[in-house]
């Protein structure tokens, strides 16, 4: 199994387990919110470019 890079790395200080847990919860929540795809906006048929083409 390949080794994954850590999600976070403490470079200074000595955070408690509760502080790390809170930070991880925030990072995971923001990451999940960014992954949510908004529904596609349906454009009106009047704006379709193919209406401008002549069909013979």
Image: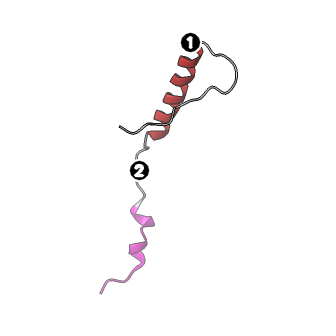
In the rendered image, which quarter contains the N terminus?
Answer: top left
Which label's residue is closer to the chain start, 1 or 2?
1
Q: For the residue carrying disc 1, how many other residues have a C-alpha within 10 Å: few (<14), some (14-19), or many (20+)? A: few
Locate the C terminus by quadrant: bottom left
Which residue is pictured at 43% across the width and 57% down the height? Answer: 43
Q: Nearer the viewer, residue 33 or 4?
A: 4
Question: For this view, does 15 lie left or right of residue 37?
Answer: right
As drawn, 55 above or below 12: below
Mark on residue 40?
2
In this view, 20 is above or below 52: above
SS for callout 1: helix
- Residue under the image location 39 percent in, 63 percent down: 45
For mark 2, give the secondary structure. Answer: loop
Q: Position of residue 28 (x, y in %)?
A: 49, 29
Q: Is residue 44 above or below residue 55?
A: above
User: Which quadrant of the structure image shows residue 48?
Assistant: bottom left
Front position among marks 1 and 2: 1
Q: Position of residue 13 (x, y in %)?
A: 69, 19
Q: Which residue is mark 1?
A: 18
Q: Residue at x 39, y 39 (%)?
A: 2
Scheme of image coloration: secondary structure
Q: Label 1, label 2: how many angstroms apart (C-alpha)?
A: 39 Å
Q: Position of residue 35 (x, y in %)?
A: 45, 40
Residue 54 counted in the magenta span = yes
């Amino acid at each position: 199994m390949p080794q994954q890079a850590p999600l976070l790395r403490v470079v200074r200080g000595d955070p408690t387990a509760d502080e790390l847990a809170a930070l991880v919860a925030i990072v995971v929540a923001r990451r999940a919110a960014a992954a949510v795809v908004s529904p596609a906006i349906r454009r009106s048929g009047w704006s379709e470019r193919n209406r401008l083409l002549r069909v013979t």
